[in-house]
Image: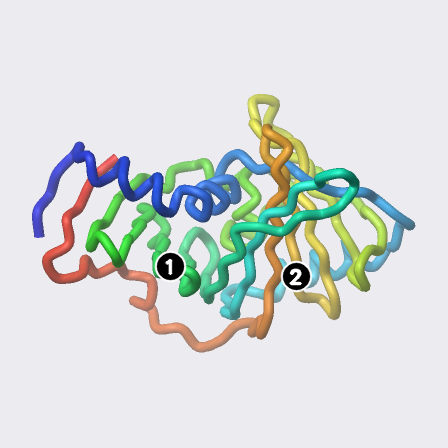
């Protein structure tokens, strides 16, 4: 294992898989909402509070895609999929399986990004950014109302939607959309500063599975280069 702090391979990795990593980064720090409130329903906030209070850990699968409106038609691109698991607060494994393999893993203190093709690990401090980020909806503490204003946002696509607005004045995102059914998040909608919409949908969502205490400890793959940011 070689520990380095700067290398051209980092630039190459960003270019090859930058779209997927940037979308996940937006969940951690800079996402905004692509959202159109419809009829208000009391169920969304009630479902969400129940989910947060009762869910200490979870696992499941996800599909991620970007959507652009062109001449009034939604164009889908950059479709990827994989699996996830998490334990509150701040511990998670987010694995892209298609079209390329990539792992994002946090142990509550640090975030590890492993690019399998390059056999390269990038290490970052998780810091306080998680608390008021979209990722906090899934991975953060259960004190979400400390960092977000929550309100009903209507019914759409068979889901009850909740709008979360960050209270931090210096936040670089505006809203997060969370779609729920039967007390479980089914989708998230996010828009970046350039108007690109990122959609996440969740499948096989299992609440409070048995996860070993060391299940989120990252082990550097044999021979991998490690870069600390």
Q: Position of residue 112 (x, y in %)?
A: 30, 50
Side (left or right) of 61 relative to 147 = left
Residue 108 lies, in percent from the top left, at 37, 51
Residue found at the far front of this picture? 71
Question: Percent position (x, y) of residue 25?
Answer: 46, 41
Question: Dot 2: what SS?
Answer: strand
Instruction: Locate residue 157 relative to residue 28 in the image: left or right.
Output: right
In the picture of the structure, the residue carrying the numbered disc 2 is 185
Q: Which residue is located at x 47 percent, y 46 percent?
A: 24
Whether residue 90 is situated above or below residue 166 in the rendered picture:
below
Mark identifier at residue 168:
none
Q: Residue at x 57, y 37 (%)?
A: 31
Earlier sequence position, callout 2 versus callout 1: 1
- Residue topped by disc 1: 100
* Residue nearer the viewer, 20 or 43: 20
Q: Quadrant of residue 191?
A: top right
Q: Residue at x 59, y 29 (%)?
A: 194
x%, y% of residue 141? 52, 50
Q: Is residue 102 shown above or below 59?
A: above
Q: CA distance from mark 2 to mark 1?
A: 25 Å
Question: Toward which corner of the image does residue 107 lie, by quadrant?
Answer: bottom left
Which quarter of the figure is the C terminus placed in?
A: top left
**27 or 109, nearer to the observer:** 27
Extreme residue in the top direction: 170
Local secondary structure at mark 1: loop
User: Is residue 178 toward the left or the right of residue 157 in the image?
Assistant: left
């Amino acid at each position: 294992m070689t520990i380095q702090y700067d290398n051209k391979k980092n630039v190459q990795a960003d270019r090859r898989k930058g779209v997927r990593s940037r979308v996940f980064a937006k969940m951690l720090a800079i996402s905004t909402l692509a959202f159109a409130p419809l009829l208000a329903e009391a169920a969304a906030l009630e479902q969400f509070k129940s989910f947060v209070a009762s869910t200490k850990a979870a696992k499941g699968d996800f599909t991620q895609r970007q959507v652009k409106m062109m001449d009034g038609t939604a164009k889908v691109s950059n479709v990827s999929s994989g699996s996830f698991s998490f334990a509150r607060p701040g511990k998670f494994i987010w694995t892209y399986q298609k079209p390329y393999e990539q792992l994002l893993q946090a142990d509550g203190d640090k975030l590890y990004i492993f690019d399998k093709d390059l056999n390269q690990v990038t290490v970052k401090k998780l810091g306080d950014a998680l608390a008021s980020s979209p990722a906090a909806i899934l991975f953060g503490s259960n004190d979400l109302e400390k960092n977000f204003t929550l309100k009903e946002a209507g019914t759409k696509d068979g889901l009850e939607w909740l709008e979360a607005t960050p209270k931090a004045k210096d936040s670089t995102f505006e809203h997060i959309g969370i779609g729920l059914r039967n007390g479980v998040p089914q989708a998230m909608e996010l828009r970046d500063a350039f108007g690109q919409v990122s959609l996440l949908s969740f499948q096989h969502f299992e609440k409070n599975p048995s996860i070993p205490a060391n299940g989120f400890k990252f082990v550097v793959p044999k021979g991998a280069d490690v870069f600390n940011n």
